[in-house]
Image (cartoon, rainbow, N blue to C red):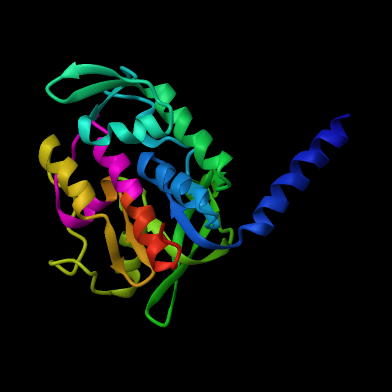
């Protein structure tokens, strides 16, 4: 029995790996914007790979605010909750409260159920750049990277990459630090996030969801970070709207817009 269990796990996992070493889209970071983008893309039959460095997808949604696992969504994003059957309660002033566990679990379920391949415990450590365009990522086990072990990584190729890594803007930081490239932003470079301003951060999160370099898109909190916009705390409507916008932009670039 133990042998058959091990065989079943390794055969299924490596089949998934082999099938997704090359994808149409690689999403780095399985927070709310990355998960929703993956759900939206895979629903359109776009081959999508989602890489998450932590053990579980979900990013900052699990913890709510200070471990009070309730989050806030503004009215503009309620249609997304309805689409994914996530319950909510009106709180006043155009705000709604949502159980963080239900919302996070729903996004994970729909991303996986729609066909996105989710790989957890794997960290991006470099990008693939050819002909002045990002065409994939270089990844390794998160414990290997954290322990600074001398172990070479694997490469995952794709048509497009989405940086949905949140506050660290990991993909963009690696791209700019190693290659000295100019980003498709007014500043031309990575700026870093500003202090808390929920209203401004929610707007910027969506506004700056865009292609910042050939082959590379940015969404969610990473969009705020790269543009020098504000953080917004435990309100997640902008994250969800950003994930949908990223999916629409990437699908359009692939010629698969709805």
Q: Quadrant of residue 237?
A: top left
**Quarter the C terminus occupies:** bottom left
Query: Where is residue 30 shown, x and y percent of the image?
Result: 44, 43
Asked whether, in this view, residue 154 is left or right of residue 168, the answer is right
Magenta segment includes 95: no
Residue ranking furthest to the bottom: 131
**Quarter the N terminus occupies:** top right
| In the rendered image, the vertical position of residue 182 relative to residue 66, given as above or below | below
Query: Where is residue 78 shown, x and y percent of the image?
Result: 29, 31
Residue shown at 18% from the left, 66% from the top = 185
- Seen from the viewer's position, the closer of residues 29 and 54 is 29
Asked whether, in this view, residue 101 is left or right of residue 110, the answer is left
Res 167 seen here: no
Q: Quadrant of residue 113?
A: top right
Residue shown at 47% from the left, 44% from the top = 39
| In the rendered image, the vertical position of residue 33 relative to residue 172, given as above or below | above
| In the rendered image, the vertical position of residue 182 relative to residue 225, given as above or below | below
Residue shown at 51% from the left, 46% from the top = 142
Query: Where is residue 248 shown, x and y percent of the image?
Result: 36, 56
Query: Which residues are drawn in magenta?
Result: 223-244
Residue shown at 24% from the left, 40% from the top = 238
Asked whether, in this view, residue 244 is left or right of residue 226, the answer is right
Magenta segment includes 242: yes
Res 236 seen here: yes
Callout count: 0
- Seen from the viewer's position, the closer of residues 186 and 206 is 206
């Amino acid at each position: 029995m133990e042998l058959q269990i091990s065989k079943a796990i390794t055969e299924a996992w490596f089949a998934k790996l082999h099938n997704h070493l090359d994808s149409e889209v690689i999403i780095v970071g399985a927070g709310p914007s990355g998960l929703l983008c993956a759900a939206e893309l895979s629903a359109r039959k776009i081959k999508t790979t989602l890489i998450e460095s932590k053990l579980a997808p979900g990013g900052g949604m699990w913890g709510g605010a200070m471990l009070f696992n309730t989050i806030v969504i503004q009215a503009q994003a309620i249609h997304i909750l309805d689409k994914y059957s996530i319950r909510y309660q009106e709180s006043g002033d155009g705000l709604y409260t949502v159980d963080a566990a239900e919302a996070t679990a729903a996004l994970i379920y729909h991303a996986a159920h729609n066909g996105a391949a989710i790989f957890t415990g794997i960290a991006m450590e470099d990008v693939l750049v050819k002909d002045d365009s990002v065409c994939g990522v270089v990844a390794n086990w998160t414990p290997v990277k954290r322990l600074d072990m001398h172990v070479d990584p694997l490469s995952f190729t794709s048509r497009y990459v989405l940086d949905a890594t949140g506050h660290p803007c990991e993909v963009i930081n690696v791209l700019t630090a190693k290659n000295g490239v100019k980003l498709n932003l007014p500043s031309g470079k990575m700026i870093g996030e500003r202090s808390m301003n929920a209203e401004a951060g929610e707007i910027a999160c969506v506004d700056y969801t865009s292609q910042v370099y050939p082959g590379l898109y940015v969404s969610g909190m990473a969009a705020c970070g790269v543009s020098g916009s504000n953080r917004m705390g435990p309100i997640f409507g902008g994250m969800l709207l950003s994930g949908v916008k990223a999916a629409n932009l990437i699908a359009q670039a692939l010629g698969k817009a709805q």
